[in-house]
Image (spheres, rainbow, N blue to C red):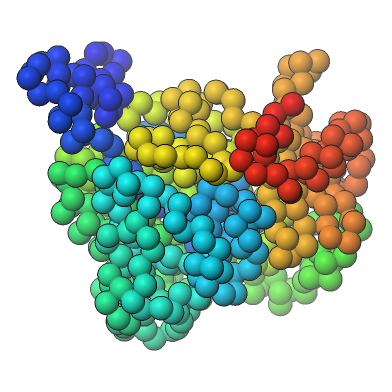
Amino acid sequence: MNRAEFLRRAGAGAAGLALAASAPRRTAATAQARRPNILLIMTDDQPHYTIENMTFLQRRLIAAGTRFDNAYVATPVCGPARGSVLTGKWSHNTGLESTDGAWRDLVDSGELVGNVAARLKAVGYSCHLTGKFTNDLTNDDWVCPGFDSWWAQLEDLNDPDFLYFSEGGAGRREMPRNSTEAGNETMVAAKYTEDFVRSRKDTPWFACFWPHAPHGPYYPLGRYAEAHKDDKPPTPFGEPERDLSDKAPLVRQSARFSPAAEEEMMQEYRGKLREVEEVDDGVKRLVTALEETDQLGHTWIFFITDNGYQHGEHYLDKKLWPYEESCRTPLVVRGPGVPAGSVSKQLVSQIDLLPTICEIAGADASGVDGRSILPTLRDPGAPTREFLLIEAEGRGWSSVRMRRRNRARTGYDNLLFVKWRDGFEEVYDYDDDPRMYEGHFDTPREQRHADVLRERLDAMRAAAGDAYRALERS
Ligand SMILES: [Ca+2]
Ligand SMILES: [Ca+2]
Ligand SMILES: [Ca+2]
């Protein structure tokens, strides 16, 4: 890349330097005015692999940034996951274990004082949110600390006829739902975020576009109502020989084997894909607005989901399961200095968003459990961690993923260890068993690492901050 291209990509800091070099009298004030914007797009209940269906995201974010193939949620269900994104902490440190009552739990936790928007506001950012903040938000005069622009959906989020929302905490309002852009919750939320980014182009901003899609029930835009009629998830329904003896009793009890259950799960999958299409349209709307207002070059864009979803893998539906479809999140980042079209295999978590965003903005990132992945955004191979926690204490399990270099075989040992409240253990080796059909300790690698994984998980489930991060590396 040439010098101009390098400076353009290097973004805020270098842009300030470039301006200073060409116009020496414009100094700190210019750099200050050019602090990068941050757009955090978080979808609701989106299996990681469905970003294959997002053509705009593929073309303008993935091809222009980094895709993370080992990014995970903190807890695979809405309320606790959103708490971890907002606070940069594990649910065992926020106390958030359930989606029922999630908003009240979050307020009562006292953790919102240090939420990501409050930290950015403290250094001069204008902060905005549209869409689903969290579950059970009914309070229509409340605004989360740190946000000065607020369009949050209120319960009942799943009402088939109306959208309910609070604009700036000024009371409960409603709009009829329909299949047009004016009545579609994703496109309405995108419009409010578009208005925000267009109106704030002279100040640094942090915008959360958190559509309540592709969460069910499915009310897609009319133009997608007939799409994806025969599509099926990439991992087939069920498991070989219907053998779930390697999985916890709760998995066996929850498994649904009937053809009718399979048909229901496939229909749900197709509903999700239709809503994934409308999310892609919302992303397009925002990126186009950033381009038209000349902000794209100094805006970071993060794309994630709050949790994934099973569509019949291991005969399971819904979420809160310890497997990839529930626990992986798509993570795509485009921003100044991020190499275009790169892929990172590093272990990354939702709890890393707050420290990463704060580092980009120059805000305080102390007192959290996550770590900044900015070094990995600059160089996709830069290591993050070797062990990563995921927990679902409300469902009765926690897990640790290991991705550790094995010099003897010039590769990595990639394992998942799950421990259930009743003592049941499962272990999977990604290399030999990528679909997670064999949870017994049946490979030499699994047996060799069993004690390390058990001890590591026990310690991680109780740790916070520096002590937690120390457990992530050997
Ligand atoms: Ca969710
Ligand atoms: Ca099995
Ligand atoms: Ca195994």
Q: Nearer the viewer, residue 9 or 411?
A: 9
Residue 154 as seen in the image, left or right of residue 31: right
Identify the residue at horizontal 44%, vertical 25% (top origin). 378
Identify the residue at horizontal 63%, vertical 68% (top origin). 98
The image position of residue 95, as x and y in percent, is 63, 61
The image position of residue 297, as x and y in percent, is 25, 34
Q: Quadrant of the N terminus?
A: top left
- Tell me which corner region of the image, top left, top right, bottom left or bottom right, holds residue 336: top left
Residue 158 as seen in the image, left or right of residue 419: left
- Tell me which corner region of the image, top left, top right, bottom left or bottom right, holds residue 338: top left
Residue 354 as seen in the image, left or right of residue 90: left
Q: Tell me if I can see residue 405 in this picture.
A: yes
Q: Quadrant of the C terminus?
A: top right
Q: Count every numbered label the image shows and give the total.
A: 0
The relative height of residue 1 versus residue 466 in the rendered view (above or below) is above
- Tell me which corner region of the image, top left, top right, bottom left or bottom right, holds residue 413: top right
Q: Tell me if I can see residue 446 in this picture.
A: no
Identify the residue at horizontal 73%, vertical 43% (top origin). 460
The relative height of residue 139 versus residue 58 in the rendered view (above or below) is below
The image position of residue 71, as x and y in percent, is 58, 42
The relative height of residue 90 versus residue 374 in the rendered view (above or below) is below
Residue 229 as seen in the image, left or right of residue 1: right
The image position of residue 18, as x and y in percent, is 18, 19
Identify the residue at horizontal 55%, vertical 44% (top origin). 368
